[in-house]
Amino acid sequence: MTQLSGYDFVAYFETKVPLWLAEKGDPVGLHVGDLSRPVNKIMVTLDVRPEVVQEAIEKGVDFILAHHPPIYKPIARFDLSNPQTRMYADLIKHDITVYAAHTNLDNANGGMNDWLAEALQLNDVEIMAPSRTKQLKRLNVYVPEEDADAVRSAITGAGAGQISADYEDCSYSVKGVGRFTPVGNAQPSIGELNKQEMVQEERIEVILEEENVEAVMEALLASHPYEEPVYEMYSIDQLQSEKFGLGRVGELAKEMTLAEFIPHVKESFDVKGVRVVVPPSKENILIKRVALCGGDAGKYYPDAIKQKADVYITGDVYYHTAHDMQADGLMVVDPGHIIEKICIPKLATLLAEWKREELWQIDIIESQTNTHPFIFDHEI
């Protein structure tokens, strides 16, 4: 079993949910704590609230993985009479690290919005608002033939040569003759000073993701026999590169009336009630194509219209935005921000899988604190 530090855990987590997927200005990542400290017990939560922190203290948690970042605005005064500010003091006092994965988790494939689409039992799911693709690079490196296998193994082991989830260690080679003359202070591994050398070489070509460039280059320089390896690195466009974005759109297994659809939403997301925007022209339509986006995503409703959705599901729709949605002829169901609580069991399951695969010596627990600030009048 492997003892984790915060750095170890975050480095692994960010290979799966990278920071570059976050929306501009979103404060994802470390919020409180020291990543050099060991991680023994991780608690997964939707929100970091004072009662969640007390739960963490009582349960001996040393790392909180949250969806919603606790610090959106700088703390002007560290006044401990304020419960929210005192919460940060409690985290520091008890050596609890807090890390947030917010819109990067929303944009991630297999992340928040895919979990919501799965809960709603949508089929043929696509990204609602594509906004990013993985930037791919091509690396060409020239290696003596006898060293080609070692260099190829080193760079593919560092992440080069993976062109999809199903194909890795992919490369192409061309053989030829390399020529060079060592001069000045050169210390060649092959050849002599001031004498032209000819070497049977292999040009290895691989594709890699931009985020792997540093690791691949380290592996290349460590494994290459030349004092100054010759290589080329450049950006490429590839239609098959992985796409990312906010929201999802998909199809219900069968058409539903609004009266049938609302109970389906409530049951799927375990909520007690919803708000509904119904344009007069859409009162009697049958619902088949559904767009959704977790959180407060009312401003993305034009993307739902563009995707020809019969209905759009998102939380915290503003009054005037609802007017705009209604005027634009879009039916909307607002089950609240709380539907994102689905991240708690889903993230816990992911962490448990990684724990088994990586032999991590950690405990993983799900927060049991209800952070939903609203109840409905029929519950009183």
Image: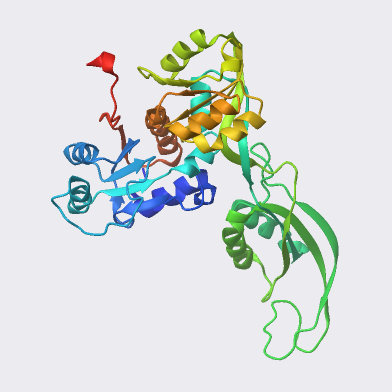
Q: Position of residue 181 (x, y in %)?
A: 79, 83
Q: Quadrant of the N terminus?
A: top left
Give the residue furthest to the left: 81
Q: Position of residue 24 (x, y in %)?
A: 51, 52
Please indicate whether residue 31 sits to the left or right of residue 167 in the image: left
Above or below 111: residue 272: above
Q: Position of residue 19 (x, y in %)?
A: 49, 50
Above or below 275: residue 215: below
Residue under the point 30% across and 45% down: 63
Above or below 68: residue 377: above
Residue in front for this viewpoint, 334 or 195: 334
- The image's colouring method is rainbow
Residue under the point 45% across and 45% down: 13
Residue under the point 60% across and 28% down: 328
Give the residue furthest to the bottom: 184
Q: Position of residue 346 (x, y in %)?
A: 42, 30
Quadrant of the rendered structure where residue 52 is? top left
Q: Is residue 3 visible?
A: no
Number of numbered callouts drawn: 0
Q: Quadrant of the C terminus?
A: top left
Give the residue furthest to the right: 176
Residue under the point 36% across and 50% down: 72
Please indicate whether residue 327 sits to the left or right of residue 14 in the image: right
Q: Is residue 32 visible?
A: yes
Quadrant of the rendered structure where residue 48 is? top left
Residue in front for this viewpoint, 75 or 252: 75
Above or below 219: residue 194: below
